[in-house]
Image (cartoon, rainbow, N blue to C red):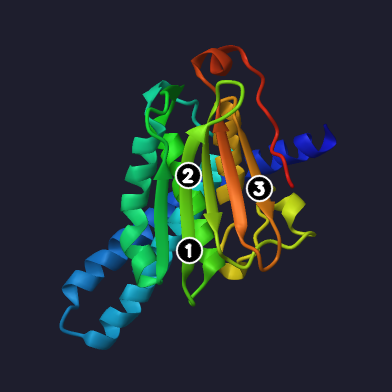
Amino acid sequence: LTQADKLASVGRLAAGIAHEINNPLTGVLSYASLLRKRMEHDAPACEDLDVIVRETVRCRGIIRELLDFARPAAPARKPMDLNEVVRRSVSVVMTQLSLNQVNLSLDLAADLPQVQADPNQIQQVVLNLVLNAADAIGADGGQIRAITRSGASNAIEFLLEDSGRGISAEDLPRIFEPFFTTKGNHGTGLGLAVSWGIVEAHGGSLEVQSEPGQGTRFTLRLPTATRAEGGTPVLPTLT
């Protein structure tokens, strides 16, 4: 309860900071973009402005993640085809994966039952898991396998397996903690925390299995409409 209260306080603080910072960031981005168009003849200045625009966009992305963590939106549930959400998510990042020499294969179960869920929020979770897997694989390339199947207790499952570096035993229990990241300056530590919050709001579960050097498997479970309406959210399981 103490930890939950601390996280709630952090969430309120993050929401206030994010709101205050977002407006000036928008101004910086607008004026930098305008100057970039006016100074197209000045190559060195354009390079400097490109840095300002790029880093401002990155800051806005961090702010957006903070707001998603601090003020999660309630799911807009409707009948959802998990296979279609996975295909749509993969299509968004396929070019990026190819450039990084990451081969992604799909193993989607036929006749998978639909569930009452928010397709946009579930796509956000799937995208985050895929991008995390690509980061874990690194520059040398590797394999990602996306699987859908029917699970126990009338649930459906999405599994994502990668051939990346894996997660150490000491880091594994912390990966769903807000602001914890193993990516250094390249991560905010909010992606998995936000994803877990989305899955919890759907009455589902998000589990992880990993060993250093052996890759990682995430398992997302979503209940059927009956369980989603009356079930109890399942806490993440770490194996």
- Is residue 24 placed above or below 78 in the rendered structure? below
Disc 1, disc 2: CB below 8 Å? no
Q: Residue at x 52, y 59 (%)?
A: 133
**Which residue is under mark 1?**
143
Does residue 202 appear left or right of residue 114 in this picture? Answer: right
**Which residue is under mark 3?**
208
C-alpha distance separating marks 1 and 2: 13 Å
In the image, 21 versus 60, the foreground residue is 60
Disc 3, disc 2: CB below 8 Å? no
Q: Does the rendering let one see residue 190?
A: no
Say which amino acid is labelled 2: Ile
C-alpha distance separating marks 3 and 2: 14 Å
Q: Is mark 1 on a helix, strand or loop?
A: strand
Across and down, in percent, residue 144 comes to 48, 58
**Which residue is under mark 2?**
147
> Outermost residue, front direction?
110
Q: What element carries label 2?
A: strand
Across and down, in percent, residue 81 comes to 37, 29
Q: Does the rendering let one see residue 65?
A: yes
